[in-house]
Image: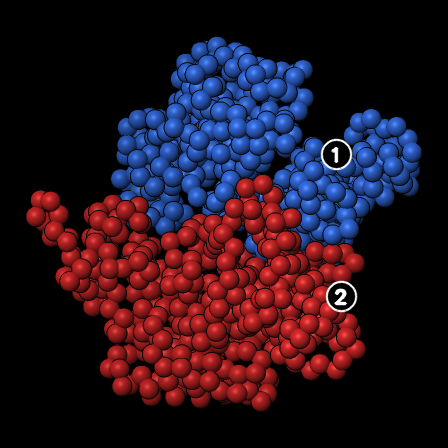
Chain colours: A red, B blue
Amino acid sequence: MPSASAREAALATTPAASLVFTTVLSHGPLTRAEIARRTRLSAAAVTKAVRPLMELGYVIEDPDQGTRSALGRPAIPVRVDGGKAFFVGVKVTGDEIIAVLADLCCRIRVVRHLALADRQPGAVLASIAELVLELLTEAEGFGAPVRGLGIAVSGDVDREDGVVRYSPFLQWRDVRLAEIIGAATGLPVTVDNDVRALTVAEQWFGAGVGLSSFALVTVGAGIGCGLVVHDRVVSGAHGVTGEIGHVSIDPLGPRCYCGNNGCVEAIAADPAILRGVREATGKPVATAAEALELARSGDRGAREVYARAGQAIGRAIGSVVNLFGPQRVIISGEGLAAYDLFAEGIRDAFAASAFGSAAQSDVMTRPLPFEEWARGAAATAIQSFIGSDTYEE
Amino acid sequence: MPSASAREAALATTPAASLVFTTVLSHGPLTRAEIARRTRLSAAAVTKAVRPLMELGYVIEDPDQGTRSALGRPAIPVRVDGGKAFFVGVKVTGDEIIAVLADLCCRIRVVRHLALADRQPGAVLASIAELVLELLTEAEGFGAPVRGLGIAVSGDVDREDGVVRYSPFLQWRDVRLAEIIGAATGLPVTVDNDVRALTVAEQWFGAGVGLSSFALVTVGAGIGCGLVVHDRVVSGAHGVTGEIGHVSIDPLGPRCYCGNNGCVEAIAADPAILRGVREATGKPVATAAEALELARSGDRGAREVYARAGQAIGRAIGSVVNLFGPQRVIISGEGLAAYDLFAEGIRDAFAASAFGSAAQSDVMTRPLPFEEWARGAAATAIQSFIGSDTYEE
């Protein structure tokens, strides 16, 4: 559920209307008959849901795409009018804030980056507000209102209350992000975990379109996982979900900051790789890029660290697949830059751990730069704008 | 989706009707207003769904439970008339077949056990048919028709085609169970994985009622897991799901029959424990009961084997919770007999591996004897009888 402030602006008043709108958003242009088939709603229910959306102008007929049925009755498809409303999406990383202005179809119209000198909530929140106000000015040129703001942060995020409960990466605890940024910008704010936000964008517009179940595994500074089951993003009863980084694959593995041993994140995330490469080579490598360069230059110790990381990721994906059998596993994140070094380990460990026909899950990689994560945040704002339970546990 | 033969007899013609019926089944008696609130359907949609169910007699008004609203308008609750239809549920274990005759409310009316001398498909199928025909005779005394048969088998089961693709435990491959038993008994047959079937019964009538997400972990001859996410049992895109037994928790752990190392099943299922106790004690223990007795008598080696098994189970539950964040984890299965020996290991390993607020998942134990598994099979038959997508991926 969206935060209190985001809840005001709901477009859809029933779950059926919400389902119809998101179906047209992902798959449009569609005729009403095609919508009925995809949503399993009756033709009458579709007509009833489409009418107010058309009256408000968010859905429009697209006669160019029309076909004439055998009986001569025209079937004019409908689509979402992207330019009718705008949304801002913000992704916060450790180094920078990325903000996008997106239209209702979640097409990116403007991108802004702002370097972060300080990870303290006060400084970061001021920077977010600054960027958002900048994009609001930009939006004036498009002639349609900005109807919501989505902010994506890593860690344990309470979307309903708009609070970042705990972000280990930013070292934030209980930051009331929606309330503060809502007051500063005047926008309805939706705050969500960054991987879940990216998963929404993949489900609606990316490699998850048309799939009722998939997993999005993100590799980089942390290791995360978004899950879609039964056509919806899993949010977890207690806020935690998709913590593939804290699936322990080895009781004798390295200690993780969470207190457990052998977590995937303690083996395969950037800091673990950096530490591993330093230990294996004795060289003072300072950044992920330097570690990568060393491994690519053929250093056996460094390569072995990446191979082990790949195996850890592959084993964890095997667990995900054995537990819920998704149609597809999408591997993404900035760690894809090292995919050539991970690939064999991931492939071998996945093959060894996937049980029976679970091995048939389609495992693919897909580069999604941080702009796409910010777009995911915009997608959560669109979700809140649509309203009526596109997102609830 | 049910097998072709089971599909004929669908009670509900729309997803809404199916949702209304299952809601009344799990939570009834309910007034129409309460149904609308629980299902999030409109009052009109509920009325429309209830009407044909009442005309057919499957749903009846229960004036005894009625209340009068402030305006004096009576709100008479409705409930399912359990005696209106009967179902047979069959669970196949390695040693016996358990069959129950259940009514439409999934109350067990008759139970039958039949020892299995032989696990060959031919012999088992003949025994299943024999038991079912016996129960059909019993059912005549109840004066309502038997409308379906559910059969629950461990392993990779294709419910849609009614085929047991691979049951490692029975050593079956590609057994066309629904077709053969359907021909022998004249009943629509639903075949499902046994843990998934038990999960359906728990969701409708057990410790999962009212929860939109939970995991049911079964411990015993194998280690299984049923998952409910977004109010529905997860079935897996490729048939495999809930294979918690094949989550590998230790790369140096014992070899599993699936080819991987350190699978939970290779550490914590009955055969692994038996082997472990033999190795640790040097004594020729032949059965799970003997191993249990030895551990209870205080044998340190035997106790250590159970403690390790408990830790493996606890770590695996930690992975499930970190990935899905279910509201509740229910531990069951015949292995609960040794729960006193597992408990500490499960508790400690779960606490160490659950990430952040995932530790808030409510972990409970619940004894479910094999009659309950057979009841789960009957629940899948009821599911097929209700029809219209109560079960689909």
Is A128 located above or below residue A150 in the figure?
Answer: below
Q: Is residue A210 visible?
A: yes
- Rendered location of residue A226, percent (x, y): 52, 60
Percent of width and height locating residue B105? 46, 29
**The N terminus of chain B: image quadrant:** top left
Chain containing the residue with disc 2: A
Disc 1 marks which amino acid?
A: Asp
Q: What is the x, y in percent for residue A9?
A: 33, 70
Q: Which mark is residue B270?
A: 1
Judging depth in this view, the residue of B5 and A308 nearest the camera is: A308
- B207 or A248: nearer the viewer: A248
User: Is residue A165 left or right of A23 when viewed as pictured?
Assistant: right
The residue carrying pointer 1 sits among few (fewer than 14), some (14 to 19) or many (20 or more) residues within 10 Å by Cα, namely many
Q: Residue furthest front?
A: A298
**Secondary structure under badge 2?**
loop
| Residue located 33% across and 42% down the image | B16
Query: Pointer 1 indicates a residue of which chain?
Result: B
Which quarter of the image is occupied by the C terminus of chain B? top left
Residue identified by numbered label 2: A255
Amino acid type, mark 2: Arg
Residue B351 seen in this snapshot: no
Quadrant for residue B343, please give it. top right
